[in-house]
Amino acid sequence: MLNEIIAIVQECLQIEDSSSWDETTELIGALAEFDSMAVVTVITQVEENYGFIINDDEISAEVFETIGTLTAFIEQKI
């Protein structure tokens, strides 16, 4: 699952190289490309890929803190 989430984030942010990314890779505040529009894009892509809806009240900075926290959130939803 982790590699799938890395691929989604990489595609949404249009970043060429994510080979050094792992579960500790920081997102919000660490990647200039990861702004509010990127959050919406990632959410939309995750919903389409995994077939569930993420409610507004589930979205928080903690979910998007790292690749690992995002992956854990998505695993809970599945």
Image: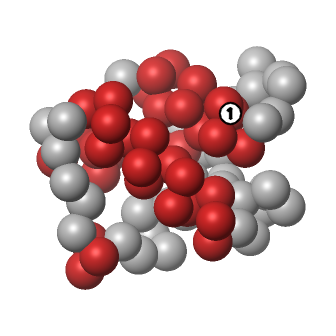
Residue at point 25%, 59% (across, down): 54
Question: Horizontally, is 5 left or right of 25 in the view?
Answer: left
Residue at point 36%, 23% (across, down): 1
61 w.r.t. 65: above or below: below
Most extreme residue toward the bottom, as rendered? Answer: 57
Question: Which of the pair 32/72 is nearer the observer?
Answer: 32
Question: Which of the pair 44/35 is nearer the observer?
Answer: 44
Residue at point 51%, 49% (across, down): 42
| Residue 19 sits in quarter | top right
Point out residue 27 in the picture as x, y percentages from the top left corner.
Answer: 66, 56
34 w.r.t. 48: above or below: below
Residue occupied by mark 1:
10
What is the crowding at mark 1: few (fewer than 14 residues within 10 Å), some, or many (at least 20)? some
Point out residue 35 in the picture as x, y percentages from the top left corner.
Answer: 70, 67
Point out residue 57 in the picture as x, y percentages from the top left corner.
Answer: 25, 80
Label 1's element?
helix
Question: Which of the pair 74/44 is nearer the observer?
Answer: 44
Question: Which of the pair 15/19 is nearer the observer?
Answer: 15
Question: Horizontally, is 39 left or right of 30 in the view?
Answer: left
Coloration mode:
secondary structure
The three-letter amino acid code for the residue at tag 1 is Gln
| Residue 37 sits in quarter | bottom right
Point out residue 44 in the picture as x, y percentages from the top left corner.
Answer: 42, 49
Question: Horizontally, is 77 left or right of 72 in the view?
Answer: left
Does the image show residue 20? no
Does the image show residue 19? yes
